Structure formats: structure tokens, C-alpha cells
Amino acid sequence: MGVCEALEPGDVVFGYYRCHALYLAKGGDLRALVAELFGKATGCTKGKGGSMHLIDARRGVMGASAIVGTTIANAVGYAYAQKYCRRPNIVACFFGDGATEEGVFAESLNFAVLKKLPILFVCENNFYAIHTHQNKRQGLPDIRARAQAFGMRAERLDGNDIFELCRCSADAVRSIRAGQGPRFLEVTTYRWREHVGPGCDYHLGYRSEAEAQPWQDADPLRRLARLIDDQHRREMENEVEQEIADAFAFAEQSEFPSATELYTDVFKEEAHAAAGA
Amino acid sequence: MPQPVLDSASRSATSSHRILSYVDAVREATDLEMACDPAVIVFGLDVDDPKAIQGTVRGLLEKYGPERVFGTPLSEDAMTGTAVGMALAGLRPIHVHIRMDFLMLAMNQLVNVAAKCRYMYGGQVHVPLVVRAMIGKSWGQGAQHSQGLHSFFMHVPGLKVVAPSTPYDAKGCLSAAVRDDDPVIYVEHRLLHFQSGPVPPERYQVWPGKARITAKGNDLTIVGISYMQIECLRAQRLLARIGIHAEVIDPIWLSPLDIDTIAASVEKTGRLLVVDNGWTNCGAAAEIVAQIGEKLAPLRDLRLKRMGFAPVTCPTTPALEELFYPNARTIAAQARNLVEGAETGWLPEIPEELQTTAFKGPF
């Protein structure tokens, strides 16, 4: 949210499988998101991609991958095209701490610096890949330092401080837009719930409630909410609740895709055949 | 010097009398596509080096500049992902690999991303990407420089695969691949680079959907894939000397595959030999044989046979490498066995006019 605040509508973002907030922050359509979760034809990918592959190309949400690290290279390629086509827009690419262990992370950062591409790398470091802490996975847990080693300016900041995140993002985006090449933000945060699903997972024993508590106390949403007067806040909450209710109603009323949809969108020819049918 | 074996076959596809090498056909197709569309860019390891990818990109750097023609870091994974990102942004990248084996480093981006984007994003985006991949042979290419892995990609919905064997098709298929709105794996065999044949100077496309009958016959059908098309046409001549008339087919596009042309031929001949430039197990030959079996087994008697690499890792010593690959002699022998329905023990010698002299190395 803090990063997308600094982006223009024409800028482009790439995400990963936890892409719902990014999708909404960049302006992605809420109805299409919920319909997608319901597997309906009105979903953002007609029910074909699901929760891990949200996209809204018109709003510059260019997709998300369920293979860790994969979209980093795609974002770099998009940034190359932006620069080559002399477009004013930049690319922001989001990934987790686990992605920085993939080879594609190192390869992509190297190329982005080599070609001085208009791209902002945003590493959401929540310290865990599924159930394994960063300390068990990385010889040098300082992700910012590793990014710096490729030759770009990198910063580490508290991702729960929304104002600091907005300030750093705006500064980085300004510099990227001015043609100064890629920038890197390591943003610390925390995963409250289990890897997949709505439940808590303290019973697994890989982390404790005591570890999670300070992060939950520092919830950026609550911190932000405290800055708004009660009446204004209630109005906003009502508005959002209404929007959510509308999206769920829309999703429930929408149809599932027809059987012929199974075979469309493999190649362009199939798309044409379907359109003609 | 012997005439290039494919001349007569290619001439039937074109009225042009201009003779070009396969290398120059690839270069010309790239040049013409780049000239008419600034979205076309070319890159890969060593693309901008003095050897210019065996000459296939020669002169393009000077003509189009380093933003459109560039060498890359040794990062096949990320550079493939980068190519996908460029394609999502509206470019038409051609990513070049001097060995197909290197694609193993790029499988995630090719299989999990390029092939999937159009479908998993519900048709919102598409990936007009061309991946040129060369298969090596001889001169000590060995285990990791010789693999024909096209069947890996044929397996995956969302990818197209083409393996042209003539200069005419090399140019037309590359142009078609660049114009295609979906990802295409363009398979070049290094030995095919030394083929010459008629190539019209203008821009044209050889689209998916049509296999080419490269020799007419009624006794059996031989399908030769990529470089094996050359060996099959040599085998066809050896067979003609003993009165066996083989119909030889070049599928050109492997995915989507024009099975109907092959089926029509096998319906006539009843015998099918598929010779692949790869392993037979779960390979392109297995797929073609299976499809023909499904289509024609209910209709008529069939004799089916696959040939391909020996089911081992490719060795470097010529003494063993010679045994690793099918060749005109072993293809002709298997074809005769298929026609006669028995092991004949026949293994013809290669006459002088069918021997190759074009390639003398080094790679």
C-alpha cells in the first residue's frame, strides 16, 4: 500500500502468490478479485488462475506467480521494454525474503543494474518461508547488503510504519523515474496466520505467540486508524464494508465459466475460435 | 562437391532460384522482421560477439544498435524471465541459445510462465516470445551440447515448437514464429546450418498447420524430424535403388502438429517409420506413432516403428557417437525391414554422391 501510493496509474507492478493487497492497492477491481476466489466467469482470470495469479492489466497489475522469485525477472523485462520504448512509467516488483535465495533474484538484479532499468525491487521480509526462519536459510540475512552488492542503492525499513514506507518509496520512485536506475527496499513485516489458510499455527512449534505479539501490536492498520477521528473512521469503515458486501454479492450472483472455457486461452487461435463460435 | 540433398524437395515449395544457406536464411528473416517492426529485439549469450551466433545475427548489431541486439550475462533463467516480461510489455523478443541444453536452466520461465500466461491470466495477456535453440552434433559435443529436447516442450500446452530443416522453412518459420502472439521454441540443428537451398528474398511465413511431403512414394511413410530429415532423404534414395519407394514427410511444426498429412500418407502405405533427432522414449516419434495408431489402427493393418538417439548419454568418441545416432544406412535398413515385415540383415553402403562434406568444424 505504501509503495503503490508513490506510483502513477501507468506504472506497473508484479507480485507473488500473496498478491491480494498489492492488487487492491494498485487499483485492481475488487469485484473481479472476489469473483475469482469464487471461481466465477466474472473473476479477473475467468476462474482460471485463482487466488495466486491475480491480474488487472488495465490497472497495471501484471500478474503474480506461485513459483517463488519468478516474477522478479518478468518485472525486469517489463522495465527493459519501458526504457526501450521511452515510456515514462516504471515497474515495481514485490517478493518475499525466500525469493532472495533463488538464483533468479541474483541474475535479475545484476541485469537491472547493468542496463540501469526503471525498476523498484521491494522485498517484504516476514522472516519465514513457509515454516522455516530466515536464519536457517541465509548465511547473510542482511538482504539489503546483498542487494547493494549488485550496485544499487538499497534501504531497510520497518514495513509497519506506513508513513516511512510512503516517504522512502516516493524518494526511490522519483530517482528511478529520473533515470537513475534500479532501487531496492527491504521492508520488514510479519505473517500473522499460517502459511496457507485463516488459522493460527503456533501449535506447530516453529514460532511463538510471544514473537508474533509485538508485530500484531504494531499493526499498521490500527496505528493509522488511531489517527482518524471516530466519526470519519466509522464512515470509512461503512463505505468499505459496503464495497466488500457488494463484491461478495456480485461474486455469488455470477455464473461459473461454461465448459467451452476449458479450451480457450491456450493460444490466440483458440481465443479467436471461441469468439467466432 | 555433391549437390545439397534437399534442393529438389525445397524447390517444390518455392519458385525462387536464389540459393541461400540456412544461416543466411535465419539472419535474413530476423533482419526483415526487425526492419518492419521496432518491437522485435534479439539477445542471448554471445549475440554481439564477433562470431555473431554462427553468422545468424551478423550485421544486425551495426544496423539496429545495442538496445535491440545485445549479448546477455550468463543468466539463462533470468534472461528468459526478462524475455517474458518484455513480451508482456508488447515487445517481440527473440532469445537465442547456442545450445538447446542451456534451456534446462530456463525451464521454469518457459514452462511455468511463458506457456501459462495467456491461460492462467484468462486471456488478459499474451507472450509473443521466440526462443531459438541449437542442437549440436559431432566435434566432441557430447553429453551436454547435443541434446534434442524438443519433445519436452511439445508436452506442454501453451508452447509451440518448430524444427525447420531447409533454408526456405528456416526463414519462413522464423518469420511466422516472430509474428505469432504465443511463445515458440524454434529448434535449429547445428548441422542444418550448412544446408543451402532456394530462398525468396521477400518476407514470407511458413505457418503452423502444414507438414511437407519431401519425397513421394507408396511403399512406406518416413517422417524425419529436424536434422534427421536429411538422413531420411538419403535413406529414401538408398531404398529407391532396391525398388522401395518411400514417402518422406517433414512435419516442420511439431506443435501444433499436422498429423493429417502424415495420416493420409500412412493410410496409403500402411507402414510408418518416424526418425527423431532425440530419444524415442516419450519423444516426438512416440507421439506421432501413437496418434497414427489411434487414428488408423481401426481402419487398416499398420506397421509402426520409431528411431532416434540410442537410449544412453551422447558419447564424444566418434567410435561410439556413430552408433548413437540414426543415419541414412540404419534408417534405410529399418525401412526395408518394415516393408518386408522381417529382419533382412540389409545395411547399404553410402555412395559417394550422398556423403556430406559441408561441415569440417570447428563449432
Image (cartoon, coloured by chain):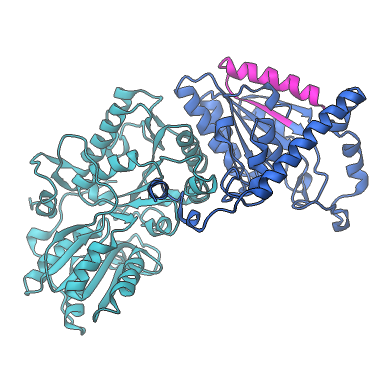
Whether residue B259 is visible to the viewer of this picture, yes or no, is yes
Q: Position of residue A201 (x, y in %)?
A: 84, 54
Q: Position of residue A65 (x, y in %)?
A: 60, 45
In the displayed structure, B347 sits above or below B15; it is below
Foreground residue among B5 and B290: B290
- The colour of chain B is cyan
Q: Is residue A182 magenta?
A: yes
In the displayed structure, A259 sits above or below A11; it is below
Foreground residue among A265 and B131: A265
Q: Residue furthest toward the front?
A: A253
Left or right of A11 in this view: A188: right
Q: Is residue A178 magenta?
A: yes
In the displayed structure, A119 sits above or below B309; it is above
Q: Quadrant of residue B167?
A: top left
Q: Quadrant of residue B41?
A: top left
Left or right of A272 in this view: B73: right
Foreground residue among B282 and B261: B261
Q: Which residues are magenta?
A: A161-186
Q: Main secondary structure of the magenta part?
A: helix
Q: Position of residue A14 (x, y in %)?
A: 60, 35
Q: Residue at x 43, y 59 (%)?
A: B155
Q: Position of residue B122 (x, y in %)?
A: 52, 46
Whether residue A141 is visible to the viewer of this picture, yes or no, is no
Chain rendered blue:
A
Q: Quadrant of residue B282?
A: bottom left
